[in-house]
Amino acid sequence: MPQASGSRIYVTTTYVLAMLPPDLKKGSAEFLVLSLLEHERRHGYELNKLIESRSRGVLTFHIASLYPLLYRMEDRGWIAGRWVERAGERRRRFYSITAAGKRALEDLRTGWVAFAEAVSRVTGVRYG
Amino acid sequence: MDEWRRHLRVVVAAWKLPPEDHTAIVEELEMHLELQLTELSVRIGPDDALAHVLAEIDDPALRSAHVQPRHRPAPSVEASRHVRGGWHGLVRDMRYAWRTLARTPGTTILATVALALGIGLTTVMFSIIYGTLMRGLPYDEGNRIAIVERSAAVNGMEETMPMHEFLTFREAQRSFESFGAYLPATVNVSGDDHPERLSATRVTAGAMTVPRVRPLLGRSIQPADEDPASELVVVLSFALWRDRFSADSSVIGQSIRVNKLPSRIVGVMPDGFDFPLASKLWLPLRLNANLPWGSGPSINGAGRLHAGVSFDQANAELARIATRIDAEHHRTNYNARAIAQPFVRAVLRSQVYTLLYAMFAAVALVFLVACTNVANLLLARAAQRSKEIAVRRALGASSAAIARQLLVEAFVLSALAAVVGALVARGGIGVFRTATEGQFPFFADISLHPQVFAFIALAACVASLVSGVLPALAGARSTVGDVLKDHPLGSSSRNRGLSRGLVVFELALSSALLIVAALTTKSLLNLRAIAPGFRTQHVLTARVTLAWRDSVRNARLFERLSSEIDHLPGVTTAALTSGLPGTGWEQSPALVEGREVPQSGRRPIVRSLAVTPEFFAAFDVPITRGRAITSDDRRGALPVVVVNQRFVDDNFHGQDPIGRRVNLSDNDSSADWVTIVGVFAPLYAASMQNPWPAEILTAFRQETHASATIAIYTTGDPGLVTPSLRTAVTSIDRDLPVYSVAMMQDVLEQSTWPARVFGGLFAVFGIVALILASIGLYAVLAFAVRQRERELGIRMALGAARADIMRLVVRDGVVQLAVGVPIGLMLGIGAAGVARAVLFGVQPTDPASIVVVVAVLAGTGAVACLAPALRATRADPLRSLRAE
């Protein structure tokens, strides 16, 4: 069950995003994906694992939200998917960030910093 | 299949995506879930892990997720790199194409050979056309050099120009910077112990300046040499200078005898100079303007247009001058016009143009057949590779990238074929040059010019486009879904229709070529099989021309010559004639006494030869009625003639011709009445158009001749007689050369070279086209059977007999043959009408040839159909079903 504990948001891995306001969730999901693809191409499962591990289990995605999100981003031209085959493995679809994706990432980053600063100024909650 | 996988498919199906998106997304999600399952199984056990995964799939959010079909054309990384990758992309495509081609060496070699033959043959034909018609004269700005002739009032045929007309044109014209006259001649050259009969050209000084070539030594013909009072001079060709004078530069100023007249050598032209005709020497053409109008020789004009003056402008000026000539000389209804034509155009008459371009059209068809063939092979292979293409599409390759890849493959193949084709062309040109040695005008240079290589490159590009476009389009159209839902070979059913169409096209072209090839081959056989009606083996022929103008003296000389030769060792019989049977006929009007001159005013024309009595024995010509010409038929006796059966048939309609009189003049002149004393069997006239015309033989000794052809029948090798013949002639007159020494059978062969060479070429084209079309038909049918293996297997499993299966497969091929062949036959018969010049004794609609062509095609088609059909009956139903 989700519980609030001080300044930390604790959620079970499954339902965390449901708790976040829809706009915030949407914006942050794309932000997360773009950040993880900024320097390296990754496949869907890897993205999910990274989000989960780097958020120490706080953030995680279902396939129901992750893949439609990836396809939308692909449609928008922010990321590009490509099937890659390696010897002895089944092929996987890797995603990499496009030039448009990099510009979007910059915008999101700026917006997020401004937003987080605004929130902390108002709420007095500090990250760190 | 695992339950969760099935479940996943159902859920994703709710997104209603195009099949290729559906497949790709399912694959991606499966991958994700598999990894998740593996990881969770370790952590929480397989059952819980599976429950977890199923819960993920069952998440209503997944079912209701809104996923758009993928963008198309997908600007994916690979595709965009393919399209924009420029040089690197192209190099990679070429490397890939090379690997693909190397994987199927059989197809690759077949396609390369087919294309190489197509390119090679087309190149041979192009180099012939380029070397003769397009390259022009090998002189500075040769395209401005013109031949000026008179265009006949009656039929527009070019003819020589009366001297005074030429002089008036030369005086008045302003279009040409140099303008002159020439006359071909053959002259006896002597001066040492070695008399020769040589081709010469009499030229005015103007004609020699037209090509802008400076003499190698001394000077050329100058205006002063044209004065009848001046010293006789001669300019030597390089070849004559080298061969007769050992390239001695002190030859200038020396004297030689030309037609017994001493002439001073004033110059030597450089190697390769042949203007306006191939000549061994040039003599001044002396035109005496003081002669009355209308007398003097008729000559040919040659000129070089001023820069910037077109042929049309020059002709307009010549027409104005001609009108003035008509007015000044009060001529009406004369209408003769001088016309200036580009040199090559004037020398090679329109028949040569027609023939060469007809040949080019034929060879272009062979080329097209080859391209179609390769297109078919590539199409078949593209279909086999449809899985691979589907994978590449799934990987994000766009239609453009796929099409480009397939085009690059065709290009690599064409490049390979171009290299082999260039070798084929080299060999072909060599064979052609040997076969036509000395037959083309001096300016023709049929070899591998740089332009020919450019043509090969162009042909390769055309080949890669023609053979690559259809497979490329087919490949680009195929989608991932096609492959997955349709059939193991995906979009190939569409390709099959396409390749069937190609085969029909190919069959039509091949039948067209084959019918032409069959007709020309039959012509060749007819030519070979012809019994000429006279002896051709063991007969040596040669020619002498006397320089004297005294006919009595000439007659005496010929008498001596005749008896001298008769006594040479090895000689059985020797005849003197005005020409050779087969080739050397003269034309003569011949009107039988009592018959009216036709209303057209044109008297019947017959071929005539003047012969000595020995002619009949030397050539073994039998007399069928009356008598032959005898030694009593000499000057002062009754003028006689023997005629052939055709002449009798044409003129006497069953009446006895012996004793009837014939007039051999244009105007019933009393001097030209001859009496028929005998009839001989027809002699072949070596004419493709009219091989058995009406012929007459007159008595050589009753006429005046300056030249004679010597025909010697020998028991042994006729070649051995040549030296003693030369000695005998020189002993009579040391200035008298013996020339045109040849064996009779060679003379006859020589007369049929266009039929042999061009007919032979047509035959080669036809056979190559047949081979290519057979390969095409076989490849397509074999491919179709491979595709239908499963269907055929099921049919057999359901009880279809082998015969049914055979019929099913063969029917496919028969339909293609039935559509393609008739179209081709009609095309071919039309083409043969154009190429009539090389046909002999056969009509374009010759039923036997048509039957042969249909039989050959049906036979080839049967083999091409039966092999795949047999293969089909061996198809194992279980195996093909399991494969599915």
Image (cartoon, rainbow, N blue to C red):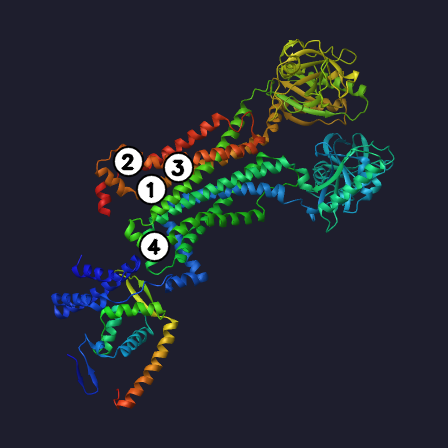
Chain for disc number 1: B
Q: CA distance from mark 3 to mark 4?
A: 29 Å
Tag 1 and tag 3, C-beta contact below 8 Å: no
Q: Quadrant of residue A62?
A: bottom left
Residue identifier under label 4: B479
Chain for disc number 3: B
Q: Quadrant of residue B636?
A: top right
Q: Is residue B733 above or below residue B340?
A: above
Q: Point out residue B685 in the picture as x, y percentages from the top left corner.
A: 62, 22
Q: For the residue marked with disc 2, what is the amino acid? A: Ile
Q: Do tags 4 and 2 sit on the same chain?
A: yes
Q: Quadrant of the N terminus of chain B?
A: bottom left
Chain for disc number 2: B
Rendered residue at 31%/52% (across/down): B483
Q: For the residue marked with disc 4, what is the amino acid? A: Thr
Front disc: 1 or 3: 3
- Tell which of B763 and A61 is nearer to you: A61
Chain for disc number 4: B
Q: Do tags 1 and 3 sit on the same chain?
A: yes
Front disc: 1 or 4: 4
Residue identifier under label 1: B784
Q: Point out residue A126 in the picture as x, y percentages from the top left corner.
A: 26, 89
Q: For the residue marked with disc 1, what is the amino acid? A: Ala
Q: CA distance from mark 1 to mark 2?
A: 13 Å
Q: CA distance from mark 1 to mark 3?
A: 13 Å
Residue B805 is marked as: 2
Rendered residue at 66%/17% (across/down): B569
Q: Is residue B104 left or right of residue B441?
A: left
Q: CA distance from mark 4 to mark 2?
A: 31 Å
Mark nearer the N terminus (3 vs 2): 2
Q: Point out residue B846 in the picture as x, y percentages from the top left corner.
A: 50, 26
